Amino acid sequence: MQIPPAYRGYQAPDYLEQCSQNALHHEAIRHLRTQRNALLDAPNLAHSRTVAYQTRHFSPSCLQLDQDSVSIGQSTDLSESQHLLLAQALDTFRPWKKGPFTLFGTTIDAEWRSDWKWSRIAPHVSLQNKRIADIGCHNGYFMFRMAQHDPACVIGFEPYAKHYWAFQLLQQWTRLDNLHFELFGVEHTDLFTGFFDTIFCLGILYHHTDPIGLLRKMHQALTPQGEIIVDCQGIPGDDPVALMPRQRYAKARGIWFLPTQSCLENWLLRAGFTDLRCLFAAPLSTQEQRRTPWADIDSLADFLDPHDPSLTAEGYPAPWRFYLHARRS
């Protein structure tokens, strides 16, 4: 199938056109966007682009964003041949790590029960008419959940190009004009000085070598009295310390610092945040992160010591999750 070279899926009106030059670093954002969007045409993503293009005209009869499963359309909205195309498209983006979704009657049980995370956070935030950043947005599950609250805009930051096409697969059916996806990383939030009312930093900090530096950038990106919600993997304990694994943690590379709750609080305080509140603190459970038919991969149960689930496979303390709310001073 011949796909237009410039095909990018459904594009909401550009938020840059709605903001003054003083509010954002327009030129720098456009330049970075051009650089990063070139990744969308990588040969290894050709199939992802193709299935998004093939399914672009599916027309859902309903959209439900206020339930645990983001639901788009009904089974009867599609013909038999369209259901075959849908199955091919959904298979392309396995493993589904964030969810759940129900797409034209097909329920996707993702590796992570992202709805559990959202249910812990949603009661503590008011998003109507707010400008929001979703850092590490992946396939956009949380962006779709945020959309029900009528925000002014949600900008998803996600550096991995395949996740863009997973988001576009859904966005081309929902056409939500307040949702925007940028192939940016958390390190690029300094291009949005004083712009966001709310920043969600969910499951990001422990993957980076300079968590305090990134928190400072996010602090600068908030409006005065703007809020940040941080979900960070960490370890149990009362002392303000962080574990730095020698190589892998729970069989994963790319994990650098795993703080205790008090250590995470100190990171936020030293980055300039105030009014800290803990929204949730508990061990990560194998019911929240697990292998499913849509994510047939090793998951949390495989990463723990089979004889002592309070330890990882390497003998480190098993992961906790800490959710903190704070404000820009």
Image (cartoon, rainbow, N blue to C red):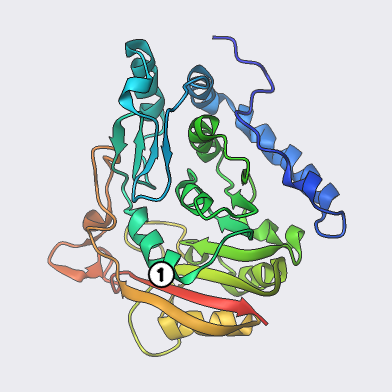
State the residue at coordinates (54%, 66%).
Answer: 126
Residue 243 percent coordinates (x, y): 41, 76
Q: Residue at x 39, y 17 (%)?
A: 85
Q: Quadrant of residue 212?
A: bottom right
* Residue 140 x, y percent position in the rendering: 49, 46
Q: Is residue 82 left or right of residue 272?
A: left
Identity, as a three-letter code, of the amino acid under mark 1 = Pro
Tell me the residue at 57%/53% (across/down). 150
- Where, quadrant-wise, is the N terminus in this rendering? top right
Q: Is residue 301 visible?
A: yes
Q: Is residue 39 left or right of residue 90?
A: right
Helix or strand or loop: what does disc 1 sit on?
A: loop
Residue beneath the point at 56% across and 67% down: 209
- Among all residues in the image, which is located at the extreme front? 61
Q: Indicate left or right for 288 with 191 as reference.
A: left
- Locate residue 185, reporting x and y percent: 62, 53
Compared across the picture, whether 113 is left or right of 205 comes to: left
Instruction: Locate residue 309, reporting x and y percent.
Output: 18, 68
Q: Which sits in the foreground, 236 or 29?
A: 29
How many marks on residues? 1
Q: Residue furthest left?
A: 307
Q: Is residue 106 above or below residue 309?
A: above
**Residue at label 1?**
245
- Residue farthest right in this picture: 21
> Observer-nearest residue: 182 or 316?
182
Quadrant in which the C terminus is drawn: bottom right
Q: Place residue 33 in its image quadrant.
A: top right
Task: Examine the rendered structure and indicate whether residue 234 appears above or below residue 163.
Answer: below
Q: Nearer the viewer, residue 327 or 138?
A: 327
Camera sees residue 95? no
